[in-house]
Amino acid sequence: MKKNYKNTSPIFFLAIVAVAVVSGCGPSKNVSSGAIPQIATVTVAAPERSMVQDTLDYTGRIEPSQRVEVRSRLSGYLQAIKFRDGQQVKAGDPLFVIDQRPFAVARDRAQAIMAQAVARQKLAATQLTRVTRLHQSGASSPDELDRTRGEFEGAQAAVLLSQAELRSVELELSFATIRSPITGTVSDHRVDIGNYVVGGTAQGGLLTTIIAQSPVRAVVDLSEADFQRLHQQKKFPDRAQLRFDGTTKTQIGTIDFIDNEINARSGTVRLRASISNADKVIKPGTFAHVRIPVGTPEEKLLVPDSAIQSDQTKKLVLVVDANGKVAPKRVELGGLFNGKRVVLSGLSVNDKVIVSGAQRVRPGDSVKLSAPAAGA
């Protein structure tokens, strides 16, 4: 006989579902109760004591000690280039040659004009000698003597003028060979052979540039407050420490220039430190981290920079107290020294600073201590 469920009440099905749910909510054998929380292990270390030199840290840029834009004094066609791009050159080395033929012709013409002037001077001198003798014997008038003397003096002036003209064209001829004014590294040539070079003005075509790479100078802009801080010392610092990106090696630069005024727009004063750069490794244009010493070294406490935590605007370190619990301490910080952070106040030398594992604990937690590894 087939059972008929059409008239079965929905309440019956709800009762079955409720029984199933209640039976599934019983205590589980896999759920543990009353588990004891584990105590985290942290690494602690006492703050390190060291003599620390207070410094002003700036980012500067390296500039060459000399930089020359090479331009032609003359206009003409470029005939020769006497250097390789990027070559080291000495003062006086030839760099470019402008077509010399027009200037050689001008020189020859000036030499001919000077020869004519010298010949006229000799003739005028002979005539002056003869007229002077005639005048002494009474055979010549004073007017004729004055005229002859005037012709001689004019001939002398013509010789001087022709000599000056000759020197001028010879100077122009020498300018046709453009020589390096300094010792340094030449850039690439900006004009190829056969091009017409416009010279004689500061706006003339740029041929190349030369920079002196030894020494070089690190230039920084000190704030007015920092400048006054340095100026109030008994002695203004004469050395600065420089470090460059990509290397941990530092170099010592000599502070050899401080500008004579404060820039009214930026409120800064320019300071320069020179480095010998004998190996020419430091390229002008490089950024440099410049550290200027302030005052005398003092004993300070140092902690790893990773131990510093932030709480809004406050700086904190976590320490372990005498009861083995984590406690925060607010600190006042200085700069970095030998890779560690200077603590100006807030810590004592006996504090146990958490240097590893601080991310696993909170203030008030009990912890186990672990000594730092050697060299940490």
Image (spheres, rainbow, N blue to C red):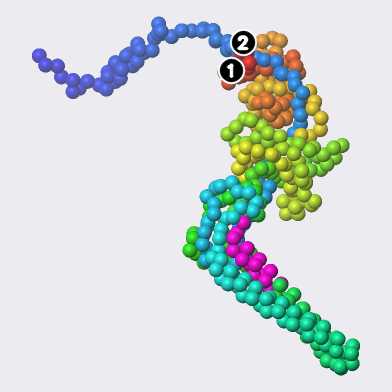
Residue 171: say if magenta. Answer: yes
Q: In this image, 136 relative to 204: left or right?
A: right
Q: SS of the residue at dot 2?
A: strand
- The answer to which quarter of the image holds residue 215 is top right
Kind of residue indicated by mark 2: Ser
Instruction: Check the picture and name the quadrant holding the C terminus.
Output: top right
* Disc 1 + disc 2, Cβ < 8 Å: yes
Q: Residue at (75%, 21%) from the top-left corner?
A: 50
Q: Which residues are magenta?
A: 164-179
Q: Residues within 10 Å of mark 2 (few under 14, many from 20)?
A: few
In the image, 162 versus 245, the foreground residue is 162
- The residue wearing badge 1 is 357
Residue 140: % across, % down: 85, 92
Where 350 falls versus 114 (above or below)? above
158 on left or right of 286 = right
Q: Is residue 106 left or right of residue 266?
A: left
**Disc 1 versus disc 2: distance between alpha carbons?**
10 Å
Residue 218 appears in view: no
- Residue 29's place in the image compared with 15, above or below, is above
Judge whether residue 340 can be spotted in this image. Answer: yes
